[in-house]
């Protein structure tokens, strides 16, 4: 029966992808090197191990809406889910290296996006939890099936700069917000009534009218 191990070797931005995408290089080894793995239907749950890094004062300020006052972080700072990723690992014996593509959402309604966006530099500690089904050649080359235990995992520290590179490539100097339709309609009418060309002009004028300082 296969006894698999997993190691994340690195991560890089996927060039020319339609959506923001990171590609993790995943090394999979089998303790029984003579055993032929026909394929693996692999499932991966990626967790953000947020307690395993330090935060600069500017980062703490941006993370207030997620974790509250830094004085309370002993209770509020907890590992949380980034994403689920499935992939199919082709035939191998001994060990193999495969790509694990991970979409990077830029939706500020999503907690992981707000977390990544708040970080200035350094890295993000990730924990990869694996499960799935292994198809392998048993005695007399009969096809056998086994399950990957949830105890199988790997860790990796993703450089913040790599995530920022992915986002900047697809959305240079841009951020996205989602509004209820009725609020959007009101803003649209305001835009027309004041003869404003861009949404940036709309928001800047509203901020100025509220007395808030608007930085260029």
Image (cartoon, rainbow, N blue to C red):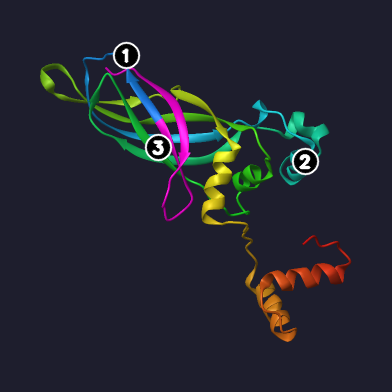
- According to the picture, the residue beneath numbered tag 1 turns out to be 31
Image location (x, y in percent) of residue 8: 45, 27
Is 16 contained in the magenta span? yes
Labels 2, 1: front one: 2
Which label was assigned to residue 58? 2
Mark 3 neighbour density, 10 Å: few (under 14) some (14–19) many (20 or more): some
For the record, the magenta segment spans: 1-25
Q: Distance between the residues labelled 2 and 3?
A: 32 Å
Give the side of residue 152 with respect to residue 170, left or right: left
Q: In which quarter of the image is the C terminus?
A: bottom right
Element marked by disc 3: strand
Magenta highlight: main SS: strand
- Is residue 99 covered in magenta? no
Q: On the image, numbered disc 3 is attached to which residue?
A: 100
Q: Which of marks 3 and 1 is nearer the N terminus?
A: 1
**Disc 2 versus disc 1: distance between alpha carbons?**
46 Å
Q: Where is residue 174 in the image (x, y as percent from the top left)?
A: 62, 59
Q: Which of 87 and 165 is in front in this view?
A: 165
């Amino acid at each position: 029966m296969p006894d698999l191990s997993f190691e994340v070797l690195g991560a890089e931005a996927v060039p020319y992808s339609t959506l923001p995408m990171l590609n993790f290089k995943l090394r999979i080894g089998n303790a029984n090197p003579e055993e032929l793995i026909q394929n693996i239907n692999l499932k991966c749950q990626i967790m953000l191990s947020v307690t395993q890094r330090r935060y600069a004062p500017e980062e703490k300020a941006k993370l207030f809406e997620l974790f509250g006052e830094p004085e309370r972080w002993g209770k509020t700072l907890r590992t949380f889910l980034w994403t689920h990723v499935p992939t199919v690992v082709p035939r191998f014996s001994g060990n193999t290296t495969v790509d694990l593509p991970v979409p990077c959402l830029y939706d500020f309604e999503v907690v992981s996006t707000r977390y990544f966006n708040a970080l200035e530099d350094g890295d993000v500690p990730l924990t990869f939890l694996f499960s799935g089904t292994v198809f392998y050649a048993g005695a007399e080359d009969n096809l056998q099936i086994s399950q990957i235990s949830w105890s199988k995992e790997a860790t990796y520290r993703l450089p913040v700069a790599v995530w920022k590179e992915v986002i900047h490539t697809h959305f240079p100097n841009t951020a996205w917000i989602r509004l209820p339709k009725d609020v959007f309609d009101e803003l649209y009418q305001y835009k027309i009534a004041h003869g404003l060309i861009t949404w940036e002009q709309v928001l800047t004028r509203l901020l100025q009218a509220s007395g808030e300082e608007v930085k260029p």
